[in-house]
Amino acid sequence: MAAIISRSTTSPSVSASSVSASSAVPSASTILTSVKSTKDSDPPTVRFTNTQDLFDIINSTTGDFLTVTNVSPNQFTEIERERDIGRRNGQKKRYRKFRFRRYNANSQILIITITTAVHEALHLGLYMRYYAQLARNGTEESWKDIGTETFRQQGHPAGDGGEGDSTGGPWPERGRAGNWPTLVIESGYSEILPELQKDMRWWFQESNHQVKIVILAKFDDQQHHILLEKWEEEISSPQGAITRSRAAARSQNGVLNPVKRQSITITRDETTNPVSYNVTRGALVLGFRLLFLRDPGPQEGDFVLSIQSLQLYAEKVWAQLPRSD
């Protein structure tokens, strides 16, 4: 189903599936009663006019994902500044928290993540379970929680940018401001899986491969499951004939490409009493070397989120769903 942008009673509704025509994209100055997004549909899309109206639209969006067009680099900087000022000083009007999923200066498209209860439970539930293992192993002082810092494309400080849902890296190796994380967790409720996978590729590419692990957590309400994907990179050797142009594009030993190392599905079974959660394809494993950029020492090793831990995680995610009654 298409996402529907509901206007006031004097204006017709606009389908987000029609936004390919520029005239069909509502502007951020349009007074909206609500911006609705059905799960796994095209995200609602609006055209930017000014920061204040954009914040009002974010307030009325029901999903966790919003696309904003016609955002120049200077306007992106303005949006970021006004958001951060509001965080520090508070606002006369209460605005919802949001993050910049991705910004592309060439296309002038800004994708915004809105912090709904389900969205936050999806990524924080995984990250906090990982961090709890750090604490149990006594290695939390060697880890920096980077959080939702805005990361910029290298060599392009005023252009492309993005913020992760949960991020972190080793201390002190990634301890300075602006250092890229080794671990990124991105979640999605109304955001479709292909968009999440674009986020994954962005992190690897724009960090110049300093990001080592990207975990995607996608909630599918219709299928009653959570999909977890763990992505890493590996060197892929060139295939086929090596032309001069291909040789220039690839190093002699190949290039780094994203590889899906794990795909785990957690399904809710409401036929049991109590409700149960079935985990397919085992526990989620995070490699120590990729996280900490060194070999594990004594009493150190990979971090394993067990099947039981993932079942408890899923239970808490489902508890955040809005009630239908």
Image: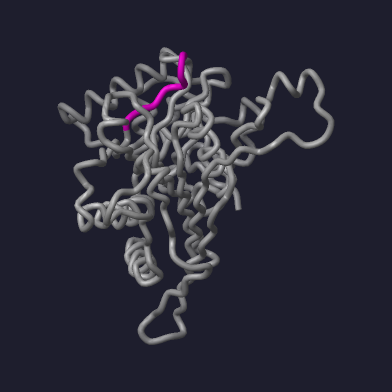
Residue at far left of view = 89
- Residue in the foreground of this view, choosing between 128 and 73: 128
Q: Quadrant of residue 251?
A: top right
Relative to 212, residue 78 above or below:
above
Q: Main secondary structure of the magenta part?
A: loop
Left or right, residue 242 beside residue 292 = right
Residue 21 position, x and y percent, is 66, 29
Residue 152 sits inside the magenta stretch: yes
Residue positioned 48% across, 57% down in the render:
228
- Residue in the foreground of this view, choosing between 292 and 316: 292
Residue 83 position, x and y percent, is 29, 27
Image quarter of the C terminus? bottom left
Left or right, residue 71 beside residue 86 = right
Q: Quadrant of residue 320?
A: bottom left
Residue at far right of view = 241
Is there any visible trace of residue 117 in the rendered image? no
Residue 4 sits inside the magenta stretch: no
Image: magenta residue range:
149-155
Relative to 136, residue 106 above or below:
above
- Residue in the foreground of this view, choosing between 63 and 24: 63
Is there any visible trace of residue 157 in the rendered image? yes
Residue positioned 37% across, 44% down in the render:
295
Left or right, residue 257 beside residue 30 = right
Q: Quadrant of residue 166?
A: top left
Residue 291 position, x and y percent, is 38, 43
- Residue in the foreground of this view, choosing between 202 and 226: 202
Residue positioned 50% across, 42% down in the render:
5
Residue at far front of view = 298
Left or right, residue 97 beside residue 271 = left
